[in-house]
Amino acid sequence: MRAVIVAAAVAFIISLFGTPVAIRVFSALKAGQPIRALGLASNEGKKGTPAMGGVVFIVATLCAYVAGHLALTTLPERQIAQEKPTMTALVLLGLFVFCGAVGFVDDFLKVRKRNSDGLSAKGKLLGQAIIGTGFGVAALYWASTNGQTVVSEHISFIRDISWLNVGKVGSVIVFVFVITAMSNGVNLTDGLDGLATGASTLVLGAYALIGYWQYRHWCADETYARANGYCYEVRDPLEIAMIAAAAAGACVGFLWWNTSPARIFMGDVGSLGLGALIGGLAVATRTTLLSILIGGLFFIITVTWVIQIVSFQTTGRRVFRMVPLHHHFELAGWSEVNIVVRFWTVAGVCVAAGLGLFYSDFLAAAG
């Protein structure tokens, strides 16, 4: 537990004090966020606000991961604690960094062109697909000494569903879909000050708890496995907990400066990276389908966006005033702060429900 707490604390401190530095640097470089003229109250006065803030919490998470491993070396007993970086860490942090890099290219093009037209949608999807495929193959084919891989060939809910075996190719396809869907879900949610940052913090916090719980009830712990009839068949759960806690702590530090009125935006570098990391956490913890509930706000915003697009293209009618969904409520007269707080509430309820299902399954299996 010490390593998880250290990782979260270090990430929080680096992000909290590093974000003002990033604000000054990006402001000096005139890396301001171009704003579309959509007639929204939330857009007034935001033009020129520094973007690319996601770089801060990505760097903070990487530094905090190192700090967490240094904390492991101070433990008097390290029976099953991983002291060296693992394939799980490589996959999760790799998704965070490389999908963030796709977002960075998009943000850079927007700043350079001085408009909101960055990387094309096809370009983003292609980048996400290539990254997802690369890390999906690594996650499936590089096994640990006990034969455990980061992802399995089964679709998972709270654990692997034994009768839903999709094979190796199918597993990689599912992995790419989850990473792409979650990455774009967080990206769509990032439209109001602090909205995506706060919601991501809640989801990442949930996965830190799930990872640590799986570590405490891990099948690789032979003493626990022999004494109990139920354990979790996952790879490197302590790594999962450290990375999720570090990212959550980094988001909290960033939120100090990103909440209304935002002094910096996370940009696509932040939203695409965060979404990819959350998707990776879902697959690594064998909670792929449960992530739909845990990340319920992202799911709702994505589904309503799809409904709007399909409805308009097939009937010429709009179901919502504007998508993503938070803009619909803006046009309905809700203030930006009210929307953010209420959407955070929805995200919190979804996270609590997801954790409740996860724990109730443990109680049923262990009892």
Image (spheres, rainbow, N blue to C red):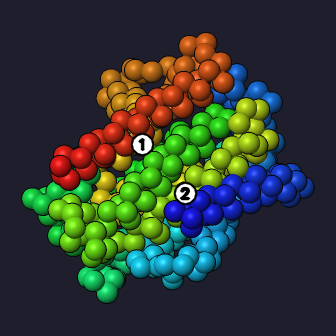
- Could you tell whether 172 is left or right of 209 in the image? left
Image coordinates of residue 189 in percent, x first then y, are 53, 39
Farthest-out residue, bottom: 145
Image coordinates of residue 244 in percent, x first then y, are 51, 58
Farthest-out residue, top: 333
Figure check: 53 above or below 48? below
What kind of element bears circle 1?
A: loop
**Count of numbered circles in the view:** 2
Q: Residue 245 carries which label?
A: 2
Residue found at x 37% / y 63%: 216
Image coordinates of residue 261 in percent, x first then y, are 77, 32
Which of 80/14 is in front? 80
Question: In the rendered structure, which amino acid carries the disc numbered 2?
Answer: Ala
Residue found at x 45% / y 76%: 81
What kind of element bears circle 2?
A: helix
Image coordinates of residue 144 in percent, x first then y, are 33, 83
Farthest-out residue, left: 163
Q: Name the residue under label 1.
A: 295
Mark 1 neighbour density, 10 Å: few (under 14) some (14–19) many (20 or more): many
